[in-house]
Amino acid sequence: MHTMTKLATALALLGLVSACQQEQAPQEEQNQTVSKDLQLAPPAQGDLTAEVIAEPSLPGLNASRDKVSFVQPLGQVYVPQHPVMTQQSQSDEYWMNVTGAQLNQGLDLPISQAGAMIRVAARADTSSGALMQAEPVAPKDIELTAPKEKQANRQLIRSLADADALTSAGLDDNSAALQMSALAQPGNYLLRVSKVLVPSANYLVNVKEKNSPYQLTAQAPVMLAQGENQMRLGLSLSGSDSFEVLGATLRDSRGQVTSLSLNHQDDGWQLAMPEMEVSSNAGLSEILVDVTAKVGTTAVRRTVKTVFKPYVASARLTDTVLSLWQDDIPQQLSFNLELKSEGRFTLGAVFTGTNGKGEEIAIFSTQVAAWVTPDNPLLVLPLSPNLIKASGLQAPFHLRELELRDQGQMARLSFQQQALSF
């Protein structure tokens, strides 16, 4: 009798456990994690992509192996943002690289307004293999002659400054300067140094016409991938409908100067770029363009400088993205990279959802930085299920402003304004 009672009790407990398991089974099924393959949208106009990837040859600036990720709540109507891909620079001055012989003989300077500032700076030269530093020019040795007139030199010059005075003003390039007077009229002036200089010595002559109506503007990319043989350049000169390009030069991060070929197109210019050797991932290269124009009877000359960062397109995202879901809420997104060598990369984006009015709302931004290798080319972008649930927003969800950066080069490799919709 006692044995029968124990058996009945065991059967009752077994039935209770079975009933509990049946009640829990739908809940477990509901909480199951599901993976889905998503496809990146094709690049659109204004996006940045890498067609061909290459292996960087320089040590990375950031070699940390630590993985860092974060999610930043947003919660406002989404306004599309685009990274700055181009830059604009303006110039009211020009530069001329000359020799000591040219300065002794006399140099023609087009001046378009009174009060112009003229500087003569001694430069170093290593073309012979040894360092040759030009002798500085003293202000008292600078002569300025007016065009077709017999004006005295001092009537044209308002003030003079030597290298010490300019250094105290922040110009420590071993130069002398003069400011022209308000009596000086536009025209071609003759600049001459009376002291005999070494004929082959290098000098830089800078003419700045502050507040001039003739401003040369250049629009150029902020970055250029190594291997690209063209750079698009926009040029315009205020106060003039036309101008002539005298030349363009490239100065790379090593200080090497190369003349560039520049061709005019309907809506801009194309610079033919040489193969560039970069000495440091932190280095910048610069381009100088010289133009001249005739405005009525006034000759105008301008030099504009624009800098850019050369970089190696070291990685790109593959098209397939693995997403993990739970309760119809995305949990994370895994991206595969195509790359030739290991390095530290950053991936970031903005996650948005849709409200009852059909408006797109930015829920949060997300970012991950990690060391990536060809054997494990994965970056996992974290999402926030709690923020998604709390927002009350529904599908379609969007991944906006997807940006891949190489932290070793501090360079943006790709950007997609509209990367995913799901």
Image (spheres, rainbow, N blue to C red):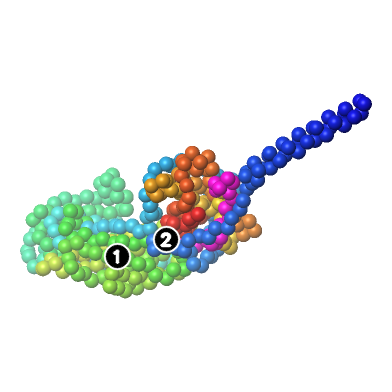
Picture coordinates of residue 123, whole percent (x, y)? 33, 59
Q: Nearer the viewer, residue 391 or 22?
A: 22
Residue 61 image label: none
Picture coordinates of residue 83, whole percent (x, y)? 39, 54
User: Mark 1 = which residue?
Assistant: 234
Picture coordinates of residue 203, whole percent (x, y)? 30, 62
Residue at disc 2, secondary structure: loop
Q: Which residues are magenta?
A: 310-331
Does the image show residue 278?
A: no
- Quadrant that contains the N terminus: top right
Q: Does 96 appear in magenta?
A: no
- Residue at 34% over, 70% down: 270
Q: Nearer the viewer, residue 216 or 402?
A: 402
Measure the C-alpha gap from mark 2 to mark 1: 20 Å
Residue type highlighted by circle 2:
Asp
Q: Does 327 appear in magenta?
A: yes
Residue 47 image label: 2
How many numbered circles are shown? 2
Position of 10 compared to 186: left or right?
A: right
- Residue at 51% over, 41% down: 389
- Residue at 62% over, 59% down: 374
Picture coordinates of residue 366, whole percent (x, y)? 49, 46
Position of 2 compared to 344: left or right?
A: right
Position of 334 compared to 51: left or right?
A: right
Is the residue under label 1 in contact with that under label 2 (CB below 8 Å)? Answer: no
Does the image show residue 401?
A: yes
Q: Nearer the viewer, mark 2 or mark 1?
A: 2
For disc 2, the neighbor class at 10 Å (few under 14, some 14 to 19, many from 20) is some
- Residue at 34% over, 73% down: 261
